[in-house]
Image: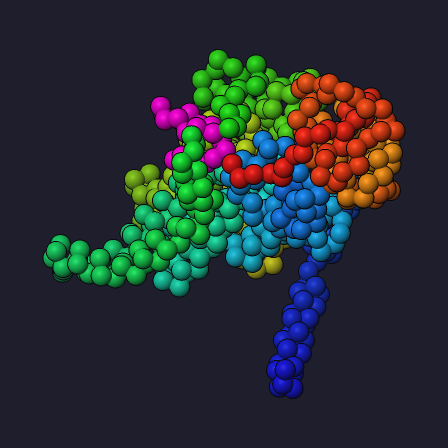
């Protein structure tokens, strides 16, 4: 690097530090207090994500196993999971799991996998601040007042990562539909494409939301190009030819982007050829939609586990779940949307009262936008209600809500967080724009800081109702403390694995254990004290039918290629070798 380049970098850093110092001096004491609270909350969430072990069901069932293999933390030969998970591993979008694996590999700390959701939340708030002008404190406390967002921010589930990306698609589309010049349009269109690529390569559940948003973005793009190239004096034929000529390059770029955006779907279409699941882009999900059946190995998408909404119409299921109308009080929100003391209905998680307030606030802001149209439009304000982005806001959020109601499992809020995130974000965007339009300068900034207080109140209420356990955990952070052992490892005691490996004493022995959902916690990576080193296989060929001859513990076979089968309360070896995972 040349000295001139280094001097330029130094000048840039000096400029950034100087700008930050000027902003700090210009911020009032009240603003500093709010920013300090944001930093404090961020530190508490970081502490929880970094220190508290990820013991949620899906985290130890497949998120951490996938991340460990993708990040090279636990090689495939050291941990052979159930063949059932192969379909999920080869079929699901894995971008978020790849990021989890990389963080785990870089830090050698399994809790680092939870930083993916927290990092995406920070990026989302930063984009709201930089591109949309929303104050950090307002966006932070408004979003974290949604219980599902707060809970998933420090979880190893990847739902929040995908839904934040999908919500950014809708917010960028909201601005894209109001853009006036070509540069601004390209800016928002680029944000739409990047956010859509991240969302679609992270989780299948956001596919309908993102696809509809992309179709609306294409419609806006075609409208912009048509208005740009067609002049009033042109004939229809000349206008159409000019439109096709000027749009050809954009259409070609869009076609080339399809494999990037929908890579998991296209990969499934190719990899399932010649199998009973051919033609299912959402493999391994088994889907029945609009009379169409896409065969897969996982039919959970068709289940309706909550008896409180079974038999209700789609609209009623949506209302009962979003507004938590049939849920017990006090609420006990959790990562799965379950209420542990009352079973697991898997509904709720958005805090129904908070959602009602935001829906009312959105309606009031839309009405005020129409009522405050310029004087020349007052007699026809409802006829010209599209002006001031009111009609565009109603169209976008109305489309998203109708899609939410129509989708399968619309009663499970964990799969539809994008709706709540978009609702809250739209409200803070409209509030920020309205305040700065009516009260420019210092008075507008002061009013925005005052608007943070109600959001801070909701945030504190949610934490009070959940006993602050999702913000500042008080439990110890060891994998094998008494609570974790009883809650996660109760089905197969760990000491039996330790006894069997030590007794057999064959380095690199392939050990086979019963199919337990937390199988990754039995690997050698999490049990370095078990000697000698062993490899783990989940699910044994002899689990369903006992071996005819059970050798005495002192006469176990000592072949590395022969799995050592470890049953609850008994130990013996198998004579049938077991292969590694195969492609579905």
Task: Give left or right: position of 517 versus 295.
Answer: right
Q: Specify whether residue 283 is painted magenta.
A: yes
Q: Residue at x 27, y 58 (%)?
A: 247
Indicate the position of residue 196 as horizontal and vertical percent values: 47, 48
Q: Is residue 274 visible?
A: yes
Q: Is residue 519 above or below residue 135?
A: above
Is 69 located above or below residue 473 in the figure? Answer: below
**Which one is in front, 156 or 392?**
156
Per the rendered image, the range of residues in magenta is 278-296
Q: Residue at x 76, y 38 (%)?
A: 559
Q: Is residue 23 left or right of residue 266?
A: right
Q: How is the image coloured?
A: rainbow
Q: Is residue 116 visible?
A: no
The one nearer the camera, 580 or 341, is 580
| Location of residue 168 in the rendering, given as x and y in whole percent from the top left corner | 51, 48
Q: Residue furthest bottom?
A: 3
Give how far across and how far down residue 478 sits, in percent: 84, 39
Magenta run includes residue 539? no
- Look at 44% across and 57% down and name the residue there: 190
């Amino acid at each position: 690097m040349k000295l001139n380049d280094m001097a330029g970098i130094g000048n840039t850093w000096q400029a950034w530090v100087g700008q930050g110092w000027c902003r700090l001096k210009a911020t009032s004491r009240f603003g500093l207090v709010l920013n300090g609270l944001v930093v404090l909350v961020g530190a508490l969430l970081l502490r929880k994500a970094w220190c508290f072990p990820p013991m949620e069901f899906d985290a130890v069932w497949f998120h951490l196993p996938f991340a460990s293999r993708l990040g090279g933390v636990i090689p495939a030969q050291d941990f052979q999971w159930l063949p059932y998970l192969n379909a999920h591993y080869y079929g699901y979008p894995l971008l978020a799991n790849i990021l989890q694996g990389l963080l785990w590999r870089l830090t050698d700390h399994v809790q680092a996998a939870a930083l993916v959701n927290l990092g995406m939340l920070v990026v989302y708030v930063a984009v709201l601040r930089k591109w949309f002008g929303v104050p950090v404190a307002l966006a932070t406390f408004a979003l974290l007042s949604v219980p599902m967002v707060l809970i998933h921010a420090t979880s190893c589930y990847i739902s929040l990562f995908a839904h934040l990306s999908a919500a950014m698609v809708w917010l960028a589309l909201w601005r894209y539909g109001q853009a006036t010049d070509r540069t601004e349009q390209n800016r928002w269109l680029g944000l739409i494409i990047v956010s859509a690529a991240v969302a679609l390569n992270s989780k299948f559940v956001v596919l309908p939301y993102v696809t509809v948003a992309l179709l609306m973005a294409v419609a806006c793009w075609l409208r912009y190009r048509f208005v740009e190239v067609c002049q009033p004096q042109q004939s229809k034929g000349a206008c159409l030819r000019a439109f096709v000529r000027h749009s050809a390059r954009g259409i070609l770029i869009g076609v080339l982007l399809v494999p990037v955006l929908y890579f998991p779907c296209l990969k499934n279409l190719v990899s399932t050829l010649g199998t009973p699941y051919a033609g299912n882009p959402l493999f391994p999900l088994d889907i029945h939609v609009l009379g169409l059946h896409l065969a897969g190995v996982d039919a959970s998408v068709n289940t309706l586990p909550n008896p409180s909404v079974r038999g209700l119409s789609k609209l009623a299921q949506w209302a009962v779940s979003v507004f938590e109308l049939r849920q017990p009080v006090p609420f006990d929100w959790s990562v799965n949307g379950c209420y542990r003391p009352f079973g697991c209905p898997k509904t709720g998680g958005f805090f129904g009262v908070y959602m009602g307030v935001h829906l009312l606030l959105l309606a009031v802001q839309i009405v005020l936008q129409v009522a405050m149209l310029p004087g020349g439009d007052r007699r026809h304000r409802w006829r010209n209600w599209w002006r001031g982005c009111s009609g565009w806001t109603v169209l976008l959020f109305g489309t998203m809500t109708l899609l939410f109601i129509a989708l399968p499992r619309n009663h499970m809020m964990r799969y539809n967080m994008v709706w709540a995130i978009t609702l809250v974000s739209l409200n803070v965007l409209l509030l920020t724009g309205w305040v700065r339009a009516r009260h420019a300068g210092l008075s507008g900034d002061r009013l925005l800081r005052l608007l943070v207080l109600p959001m801070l109140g909701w945030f504190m209420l949610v934490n009070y109702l959940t006993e602050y356990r999702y913000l500042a955990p008080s439990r110890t952070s060891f994998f094998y403390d008494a609570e974790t052992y009883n809650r996660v490892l109760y089905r197969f005691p760990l000491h039996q694995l330790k006894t069997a490996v030590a007794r057999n004493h064959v380095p690199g022995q392939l050990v086979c254990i019963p199919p337990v959902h937390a199988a990754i916690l039995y690997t050698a990576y999490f049990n370095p004290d078990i000697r000698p080193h062993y490899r783990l296989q989940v699910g044994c060929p002899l689990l369903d039918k006992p071996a005819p001859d059970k050798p005495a513990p002192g006469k176990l076979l000592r072949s590395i290629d022969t799995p050592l089968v470890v049953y609850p309360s008994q130990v013996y070896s198998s004579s049938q070798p077991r292969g590694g995972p195969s492609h579905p």
